[in-house]
Amino acid sequence: MSPTTAEARAVEAANQAFYDAVETSDLDALEAIVLTGPLAESVSVVHPGWPVLRGRREVLRSYALIMASTEYIQFFLTDVEVAVDGDTALVTCTENILTGGPAEEDGSAGSLVGGLVVATNVFRRTPEGWRLWVHHGSPVLADDEESDDGPGAGPGAAGDPDE
Amino acid sequence: MSPTTAEARAVEAANQAFYDAVETSDLDALEAIVLTGPLAESVSVVHPGWPVLRGRREVLRSYALIMASTEYIQFFLTDVEVAVDGDTALVTCTENILTGGPAEEDGSAGSLVGGLVVATNVFRRTPEGWRLWVHHGSPVLADDEESDDGPGAGPGAAGDPDE
């Protein structure tokens, strides 16, 4: 179900802007995307492998930290699915991540590492546009995430008693 | 911000009912909790380490599979935080999980394993009550998740350039 409505496209654009802000280490851009107002206290983010971070301020601090310690990061988003209902929008996507460590002492680029993360992102509609309320990213531990065979494709799968 | 309103308590009860259904392997109870209607296609679940499962049917199939292959599972929820805005509610919590494998051949109980998962759950208000739209669980890889020291407590933390 690819986004077909203008509304869904606006949500997908907000989702892309979120990743662009992280990719370009643009904390100002990120601050503009993360929800403000009455729900700011409940903004929640889970970085892969991390506990829950809650509250706009704590979330932004974590990104400042990540940006400061990440030399290079690039996101290739796939499997982007958007659902919109009223003032809430849900995006799920796969983050195909390429990260680089600090430059070597001789000045050459640090080593690049690939990673696969799935994300659940929830946006809220505001007068200024869609804003990020929730981000939860987690590592995919399966090696067959490309499969479209349903839940049997997940780790721990041992048959399908439901059919 | 613990839930203090009747509304937040209703959301917390729905969240608990979700875990109770999994804990008791009650697929009927789970079916009653997972959202139906126009958003059913967008119901999404990420089990720890899994790719995204999307659609009510696929999600329920995955739980049938998990229930069939899990001899024993118990959830102790901590850090339960609830936020409600209009027809959408957000719950974040830590799942302290105790699971048991199949019984041994001699009839004795299988070994128990503890696990720590953080979850982001989103519920939608329906005429029948709050229903689960989104569940994303992921393993906590940090060993200091008990800390309340903020994002510096997360993996990869290497100082706090934001202060």
Image: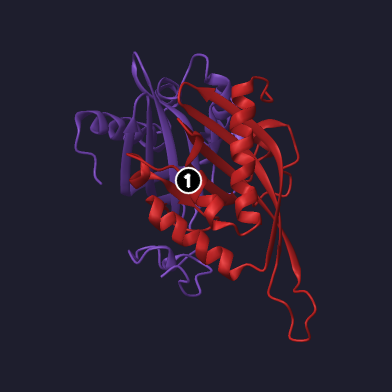
Chain colours: A red, B purple
Question: Is residue B106 among the parts visible in the rendering?
Answer: no
Indicate left or right for A76 with A120 as reference. Answer: right
Percent position (x, y) of residue A52? 42, 53
Q: In this picture, is B148 found above or below B158?
A: above
Question: Is residue B79 among the parts visible in the rendering?
Answer: yes
| Residue count near mark 1 (Cα–Cα under 10 Å), binned few <14, some 14–19, many ≥20 | many
- Between residue A148 and residue B75, name the one nearer to us: A148
Q: Residue furthest bottom?
A: A106
Res A16 quadrant in image: top right
| Total residue callouts | 1
Chain of the residue displaying label 1: A
Res A127 quadrant in image: top left
Which residue is pictured at 74% across the width and 86% down the height?
A105
Which residue is pictured at 46% across the width and 52% down the height?
B110
- Between residue A50 and residue B29, name the one nearer to us: A50
- Report which residue position mark 1 lands on: A34
Indicate left or right for A67 with B109 as reference. Answer: right
Q: In this picture, is B96 found above or below B128?
A: below
Percent position (x, y) of residue B19? 38, 37
Percent position (x, y) of residue B149? 35, 67
Q: Locate the C terminus of chain B by quadrant.
A: bottom left
Indicate left or right for B148 with B73 as reference. Answer: left
Which residue is pictured at 73% across the width and 32% down the height?
A148
Percent position (x, y) of residue A161? 60, 28
Q: In this picture, is B28 found above or below A95?
A: above
